[in-house]
Image: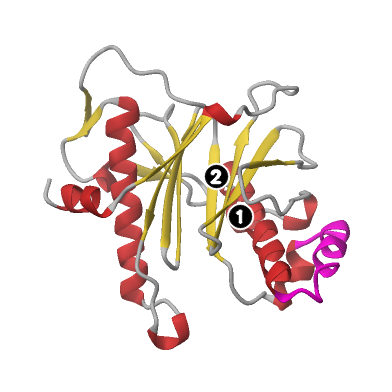
Amino acid sequence: PIYEFKSEKREVAEVLHIYIMYLPIAEENGGRRTGQKHRIEHEAGTKLLAVGLRERYGLELKTSVEAGLSSGQHGKPYLRDYPGIHFNISHCEGLVACAFSDTETGVDVERIREVKEKVIPKVFDRAEQELLFSYKAEKEKYEEIFYRFWTLKESYVKRSGQGMTAKLTDFAFQPESDPGWTEVPCTDEKVRAMQCKLKEKWILSVCMEKLQADERMREKEIVIKEITTKEKEWMEHE
């Protein structure tokens, strides 16, 4: 294994623990991300994974974290030597997130921006489209609701590991505009979905397998930790 436990006693993790890192937003190219931006975001996601493994599971890296990763049939990464550790990484313009939970998990983050009109019929079922279009006259709300749906759909398929093989209209959500953590109803009763709005610019959504069908997530079981500038420097000089 490329990891080793610091001790035999492991701290009990919260049901959902998310590490986030804010990155500079590109002003050039109309805010579009470059290949270098993607590389920086990818590296930041890997660093968050390493921090989470250390803090949540007491795992120390003996070599690069990527050396211990394998991919499922449709590309979902997992730890070869610790398949019981469930995590998922997402990044977008200005934000990176890595989620850990007790069950299979998918996370997606998106910066709120212009709506991708062409994808709506492929991604949204009829009821979802009706809800989205009810906000068409309010540009900012319309964009927010679109990315609330979009990140929920993405996190759902990332949880299952199906990737682009999944038909996105086969399952549906009913998001709200609550800026705090909100549990979102899903037509797939085996899945728990949650999301929040961060700094008025980003939507973060998580889907995970339910432990019990009638169980609801308690807010104290959700922890978000932001890696600050000081901690970023510490990671870079390890």
Q: Nearer the viewer, residue 148 or 198?
A: 198
Cβ–Cβ under 8 Å for marks 1 and 2? yes
Hey, what amino acid is under mark 2? Gly
Query: How far from the left and from the top, in percent, is residue 164?
Result: 61, 58
Marker count (numbered): 2
Where is mark 1, residue-wise? 154
Looking at the rendered image, the quarter that the N terminus falls into is top left
Alpha carbon distance from label 1 to label 2: 8 Å
Task: Tell me the magenta residue range.
Answer: 124-139
Name the image quarter holding residue 192.
top right
Mark with earlier residue (1, 2): 2
Q: Residue at x 72, y 76 (%)?
A: 139
- Up/down of 52 relative to 124, above or below: above
194 or 60, nearer to the observer: 194
On the image, the x and y values in percent for residue 70 come to 37, 44
Residue at point 61%, 46% (across, down): 180
